[in-house]
Image (spheres, rainbow, N blue to C red):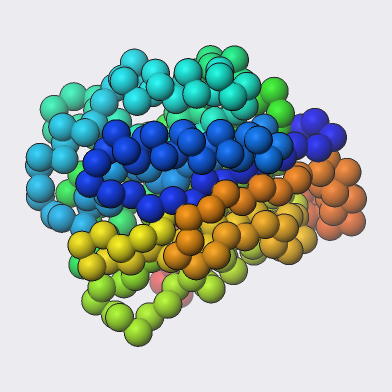
Amino acid sequence: MREQVTIGLVQMAMGDDREANIEKAFAMAGTAREQGAELIVLPELFSGIYFCKYPGARRYNAWAEPVPDGPLSSRLAKLARELEAVVVASVYEFVQDGLYFNTAVVYERDGSYLGKSRKMHIPETGPGYQEKYYFAPGDSDYPVFRTSLIDLAVPTCWDQWYPEVARLARLKGADLVVYPTCIGDEPAEPDLDTSDPWQIVMRGHAVANSIYVAACNRVGVEDGQGFYGRSFVSDPNGAKIGEAGRGTEEVVVAALSRETLRQVRDCSQFLRDRRPESYGGLLQRCIEE
């Protein structure tokens, strides 16, 4: 990691016009760059509405594209090149008819393609989040991308609830874990607000692994389902060093410090004291005594 890296999160609402969504996302990315961001993150599936609330609506499969050779991927590469910024984005990936992934892509500042990270945990949590109708579980083995700015991992949304994902990223050398995200209302439980535990669990990942963590969420109301935003950046002590509002479209910019990582890691020594030989039970779905 460089001694200091500035990250920018684009928190935005999406509408029915996909081209308008893309243009808005790119304009907000430009704003983030003007505010000093060298690493710019877009929300999960930013080019369209969150179609996964409609189980079995196969018409949305037409939005999927090959990675990195599809049209949106090419435009993201051009955006990175024009802004001279590392760009992290999320696309609906086509592999073949009947096989699709929810995929994060990473582009270097010169527009070169660094790779993709397919969403590993695919939710089906009731009304509003029916992703198993669309996405196969990822098979990209939690990659870490060695960018010119920082080594980062890019899991996606539901992956953020699993501490194993963040730990693997740290063991592979990540200094930052970024989660493109789409989360909000729970239609089956209208009184449930997950936004606080959503932030808390990721701030815990930051502390337990001595890393920076960022989550970039969408906002707005789509066919009655709201998305709460609250995109944020956590330092390795779990402190929020940048946060967007609830329901507002905005850019969040935060500075990441290599010296902070050094200090925290020298103090915590979590990797030194790990006992991986005693963790075999984690490879089991459950443990019955």
Count every numbered label the image shows and give the total.
0
> Is residue 191 positioned above or below 20 on the image?
below
Q: Is residue 52 left or right of residue 149?
A: left
Most extreme residue toward the bottom is 191
> Is residue 236 positioned above or below 195 on the image?
above
> Is residue 171 positioned above or below 105 on the image?
below
Q: Which of the 4 image quarters holds residue 71? A: top left
Q: Residue at x 58, y 39 (%)?
A: 31
Q: Residue at x 59, y 15 (%)?
A: 110
Spot occupied by residue 197 in the image (x, y as percentages of width and height): 52, 72
Q: Which of the 4 image quarters holds residue 17? A: top left
Q: Quadrant of the N terminus?
A: top right
Q: Is residue 74 visible?
A: yes
Q: Quadrant of the C terminus?
A: bottom left
Spot occupied by residue 39 in the image (x, y as percentages of width and height): 63, 34
Q: Nearer the viewer, residue 79 or 114?
A: 79
Q: Is residue 123 left or right of residue 110?
A: left
Q: Nearer the viewer, residue 87 or 211?
A: 87
Q: Residue at x 84, y 35 (%)?
A: 3
Q: Nearer the viewer, residue 159 or 64?
A: 64
Spot occupied by residue 191 in the image (x, y as percentages of width and height): 35, 84
Spot occupied by residue 285 in the image (x, y as percentages of width and height): 39, 59
Q: Is residue 147 left or right of residue 259?
A: left
Q: Residue at x 32, y 38 (%)?
A: 20
Q: Nearer the viewer, residue 277 or 99?
A: 99
Q: Is residue 281 visible?
A: no
